[in-house]
């Protein structure tokens, strides 16, 4: 069996076929990459998301904290969570509030420094709500 050619098209297909949502946003928080699984998780097609601000999927009450952390990570060249997955709220186009587990990393190169942030995400709404119901009122 021949080995695959590792060209741009190969990497594009790999991202499209990834089992989790993959989103890349540039230094200003503009979405530049949005794979098929991101569409499944958040309800927005790539044609609706690419070129838009990340506020598209960030609940309004979390935006100030998000941008404070995002801008700090871009400026410092490191994330607060170091690639660890974290549960958070997000916005789905049709259903409104969802819960997602996200991991973040910064992407860049030696010449231009940090170019933006890459996130992977999965919908954990069902699991999150079941665990919350199991714990009962706090």
Image: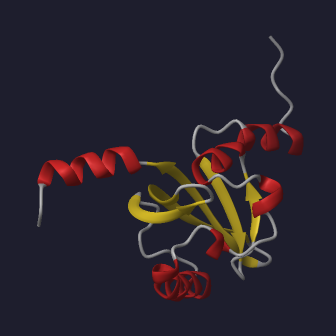
User: By what rule are the colours in the image chosen?
Assistant: secondary structure
Q: State which quadrant residue 76 falls in.
A: bottom right
Q: Residue at x 37, y 45 (%)?
A: 126
Identify whether 107 is placed above or below 75: above
Residue at (13%, 53%) from the top-left corner? 135
Viewer-proximal residue among 70 and 126: 126
Q: Is residue 82 above or below residue 66?
A: above
Where does residue 30 sit, x and y in percent of width and height? 74, 74
Q: How many marks?
A: 0
Give me the residue at 19% from left, 51% from top. Answer: 133
- Quick one: which residue is furthest to the top in this view? 1
Looking at the picture, tell me which residue is in the foreground, 34 or 135: 135
Say which residue appears at 43% left-offset and 76% top-offset: 80
Q: Quadrant of the N terminus?
A: top right
88 or 23: nearer the eye? 88
The quadrant in which residue 127 appears is top left
Indicate the position of residue 46 as horizontal and vertical percent values: 78, 54
27 sits left or right of 118 in the view: right
102 relative to 6 in the view: left or right: left
Q: Quadrant of residue 116?
A: bottom right
- Is 85 situated above or below 1? below
Could you tell me residue 6's position as x and y percent?
Answer: 83, 37
Q: Judge whether 103 appears above or below 67 on screen.
A: above
Q: Quadrant of the C terminus?
A: bottom left
Q: Residue 26 in the image: x percent, y percent?
A: 73, 74
């Amino acid at each position: 069996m021949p080995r695959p050619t590792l060209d741009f098209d190969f990497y594009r297909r790999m991202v499209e076929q990834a089992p989790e949502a993959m989103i890349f946003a540039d230094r200003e928080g503009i979405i530049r990459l949005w794979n098929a699984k991101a569409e499944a998780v958040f309800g927005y097609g790539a044609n609706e998301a690419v070129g838009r601000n990340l506020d598209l999927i960030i609940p309004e009450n979390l935006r100030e904290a998000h941008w404070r952390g995002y801008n700090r990570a871009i400026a410092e060249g490191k994330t607060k969570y170091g690639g660890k997955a974290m549960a958070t709220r997000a916005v789905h186009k049709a259903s409104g509030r969802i819960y997602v587990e996200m991991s973040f990393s910064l992407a860049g190169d030696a010449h231009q420094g940090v170019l933006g942030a890459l996130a992977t995400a999965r919908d954990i709404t069902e699991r999150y709500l079941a665990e919350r119901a199991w714990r009962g009122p706090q």
